[in-house]
Every structure is written in structure tokens, then in C-alpha cells.
Amino acid sequence: MKLPRIKALLVAAAAAVHCVAAVAAVEVNTASVADLDGVKGIGPALSARILQAREKGPFQNWPDLVGRVPGLGKASAARLSSEGLTVNGAAFDGARATAAPLPPMAGASR
């Protein structure tokens, strides 16, 4: 293998690692304002409500987060989870249940 080819592979590998890090999970119990604002769907108002609720103690799970943060419902929780938000490292359990059902496959029997 020629040296320019190896260099190109190393650059590509470094870019791939950077992309993976950019979509890394954001843990709601340890996230800063900047971390929360970096999650698509969380703006300054929601991040402020999350941090205010977190002052009373860490969130135990998704139902605890949804119950303690005003204006955060199950549909919003599912969207935020799909964007990388976690509670104690866990994704929202209802994320798949709130997604639109897939249409039946052509030719599939019922």
C-alpha cells in the first residue's frame, strides 16, 4: 500500500470517530446547559426546566423525568431519546411505540 493511501485511510478513520462522538448520548442527570441545548428539540426554556427539576434530585427513569419536567410528555421524550438523550444511560422505552407504524409489505399475508 502506498503512503498517500494509508494517510487517506487515517484521515477517514479520524473523521468517522469524530462523527460518532458528535452523536454520543447526553445523560440528563449530568448534562450541562450546553449539553442539553445541543440535543435537537431542547432549547433554552426546556433545558432550564430540566435543570430546575434536577436540583431536587437526579431523575430515576424516564417516567420520573416526564413527571417532573413541566411540558415534557411521552411524545417529546421519545423524540429527545431518538436524538440521544438518556436517563441513567437508558433510552426512552416508549420510543418505538410512539413511532408511526410501518405499512404492510406488498404480498404479505395477514
Image (spheres, rainbow, N blue to C red):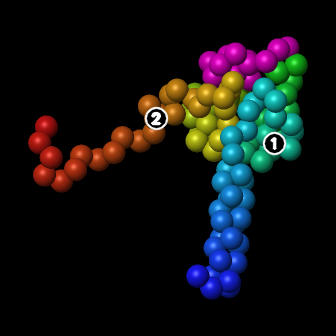
Q: Which residues are magenta?
A: 56-69
Image side of residue 13 versus residue 47, left or right: left
Residue 45 visible at all:
no
Looking at the image, tell me whether mark 2 or mark 1 is earlier in sequence order: 1
Residue indicated by mark 2: 96
Query: Where does the image place residue 109, in percent across and percent down from the top left?
Result: 11, 42
Q: Secondary structure at mark 1?
A: helix
Instruction: Please report contact status of discs 2 and 1: CB closer than 8 Å, yes or no.
Output: no
Q: Amino acid at mark 2?
A: Arg
Q: Amino acid at mark 1?
A: Asp
Q: Secondary structure at mark 2?
A: loop
Callout 1: few (<14), some (14-19), or many (20+) C-alpha neighbours within 10 Å? some
Determine the residue positioned at 57% across, 34% down.
78
Magenta segment includes 59:
yes
Residue indicated by mark 1: 35
**Which residue of the protein is positioned furthest toward the front in this rendering?**
1
Q: Nearer the viewer, residue 53 or 1?
A: 1
Image side of residue 104 versus residue 72, left or right: left
Magenta segment includes 81:
no
Counting labels gives 2
Determine the image quadrant of residue 101. top left
Determine the image quadrant of residue 69. top right
Determine the residue positioned at 13% across, 37% down.
110
Image side of residue 12 versus residue 110, left or right: right
Look at the picture and state if 8 lies above or below 26: below
Determine the residue positioned at 82% across, 30% down.
30
Query: Where does the image place residue 41, in percent across and percent down from the top left?
Result: 69, 44
